[in-house]
Image (tube, grey):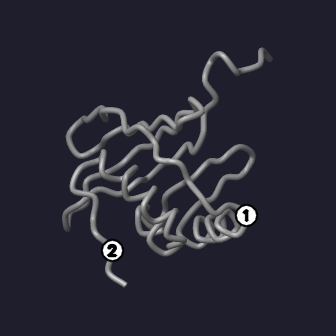
C-alpha cells in the first residue's frame, strides 16, 4: 500500500491520527525513518521492526485515538521539532527530518509528556 507523504512537519500528526484510527500499523511505521527512536514511557523502540511491534501491541489494546491539536513546528533547515496536544493535555514531541526524495519523517518520537499540572515531583 502506498502511503501519502507528510508535505510539512505538521502533517505528521494528522497522518498519525488517521492511520492509528484506521488500524494501519504499516502506515504508522511509514511515518518514521528506518532507524528512528520512539519513546513511550518505559518502552523505547528503535528502528522499524521495534516500532512496528510497539504499534501492533498498541493497536491490539486500543481502538480509538483522539484527534490531537497540532502545534506549530520549530524548524532549522531540514530538521523540525513537532508538537501535538491531546484532549487530556498530554503533549507529544517529535523531531522530523526532510527527506531527500520529498516529504518529512520522524527520527525521534517522545510519545507522551504529562502536563506540568499533573507531573509529580521527584
Q: Could you classify mark 1 by the number of other residues whose Cα lies within 10 Å: few (under 14), some (14-19), or many (20 or more)?
A: few
What numbered label is drawn on residue 25?
none
Q: 107 above or below 27?
A: above
Where residue 92 appears, as percent x and y from the top left, is 52, 39
Image coordinates of residue 85 in percent, x first then y, are: 48, 34
Residue at image position (37%, 59%) is 15
**Image quadrant assignment for residue 115:** top right
In percent of width and height, residue 34 lies at 45, 67
Q: Nearer the viewer, residue 55 or 106?
A: 55
Q: Which mark is residue 61?
A: 1
Q: Which residue is denoted by mark 2 in the rendering?
A: 3
Q: Which residue corresponds to the image point at 19% horizontal and 63% vertical from the top-left?
A: 102
Q: Regarding mark 2 in the picture, which secondary structure is present there?
A: loop
Upstream in the sequence, badge 2 or badge 1? 2
117 on left or right of 13: right
Give the farthest residue toward the bottom: 1
Amino acid at each position: 500500500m502506498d502511503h501519502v507523504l507528510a508535505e510539512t512537519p505538521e502533517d505528521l500528526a494528522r497522518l498519525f491520527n488517521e492511520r492509528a484510527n484506521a488500524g494501519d500499523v504499516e502506515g504508522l511505521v511509514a511515518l518514521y525513518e528506518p532507524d528512528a527512536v520512539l519513546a513511550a514511557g518505559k518502552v523505547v523502540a528503535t528502528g522499524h521492526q521495534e516500532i512496528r511491534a510497539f504499534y501492533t501491541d498498541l493497536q491490539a489494546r486500543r481502538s480509538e485515538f483522539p484527534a490531537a491539536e497540532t502545534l506549530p513546528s520549530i524548524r532549522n533547515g531540514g530538521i523540525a521539532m513537532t508538537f501535538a496536544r491531546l484532549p487530556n493535555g498530554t503533549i507529544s514531541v517529535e523531531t522530523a527530518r526532510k527527506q531527500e526524495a520529498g516529504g518529512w519523517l520522524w527520527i525521534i518520537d517522545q510519545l507522551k509528556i504529562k502536563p506540568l499540572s499533573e507531573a509529580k515531583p521527584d
